[in-house]
Image: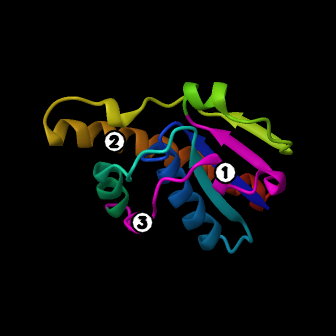
């Protein structure tokens, strides 16, 4: 089973989703390969995404934003898009299943670092619940 999480910059939402999917696949001992990519990849992962995932015990610091060309789309079973722009620019993928999770971009949050962290945590928690539900559905089809 191969899953790809897609968004625009591959610097926050799709990276957090990839981190959680790998975590839950390992926790439930499922043989799942997880990828993430962006239609216009950023130069680095958003440091606040790294920080809020570290709070959950998931290390994104060695991850990097990836382009669509780096994903074996011909082998992907499930494609999840996480933002409107990626939904429009995502290449056609003959996946068994496609879903769109319309989540706000936490990187666009303004304010103090603490205010921005609060928004990142909210999006992180939404992603966590959606990814956990997805992985559990694969464990118990």
Q: Inspect the magenta stretch and tell me whether residue 46 lies in it.
A: no
Task: Give whichever of 108, 19 is nearer the camera.
Answer: 108
- Mark 1 Cα shell of 10 Å, populated few (<14), some (14-19), many (≥20): few
Look at mark 2 in the image and give the residue it sits on: 120
Task: Give whichever of 141, 54 is nearer the camera.
Answer: 54
The residue that appears at 47% across and 52% down in the rendered structure is: 16
122 sits left or right of 68 in the view: left
Which of the two discs, 2 and 1, labels the residue nearer the N terminus?
1
The residue that appears at 36% across and 35% down in the rendered structure is: 106
Residue 58's label in the rendered image is: 3
Residues at marks 1 and 3, CA–CA distance in whole angstroms = 26 Å
Task: Give whichever of 65, 19 is nearer the camera.
Answer: 65
Residues at marks 3 and 2, CA–CA distance in whole angstroms = 15 Å
| Quarter of the figure that contains the N terminus | bottom right
Secondary element under disc 2, as helix, strand or loop, is helix
For the stretch drawn in magenta, what is the main secondary structure?
Answer: loop
The residues colored magenta run 55-82
Secondary element under disc 3, as helix, strand or loop, is loop
Image location of residue 79, percent across then percent down:
72, 44
Q: Quadrant of residue 139?
A: bottom right
The residue that appears at 63% across and 57% down in the rendered structure is: 35
Q: Inspect the magenta stretch and tell me whether residue 63 lies in it.
A: yes
Q: Quadrant of residue 54?
A: bottom left
Which of the two discs, 1 and 3, labels the residue nearer the N terminus?
3
Seen in the picture, residue 118 relative to 37 is either above or below; the reply is: above
């Amino acid at each position: 089973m191969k899953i790809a999480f897609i968004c625009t910059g591959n610097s926050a939402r799709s990276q957090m989703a990839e981190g959680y999917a790998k975590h839950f696949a390992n926790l439930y001992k499922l043989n799942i390969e997880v990828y993430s990519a962006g239609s216009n990849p950023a130069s680095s992962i958003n440091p606040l995404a790294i920080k809020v995932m570290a709070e959950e015990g998931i290390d994104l610091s060695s991850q990097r934003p990836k382009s669509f060309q780096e994903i074996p789309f011909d082998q992907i079973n499930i494609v999840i898009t996480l933002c409107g722009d990626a939904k429009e620019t995502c290449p056609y993928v003959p996946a068994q299943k496609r879903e769109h999770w319309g989540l706000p971009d936490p990187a666009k949050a303004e304010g103090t670092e603490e205010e921005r962290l609060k928004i990142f945590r909210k999006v992180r928690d939404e992603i966590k619940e959606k990814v956990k539900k997805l992985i559990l559905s694969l464990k118990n089809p």
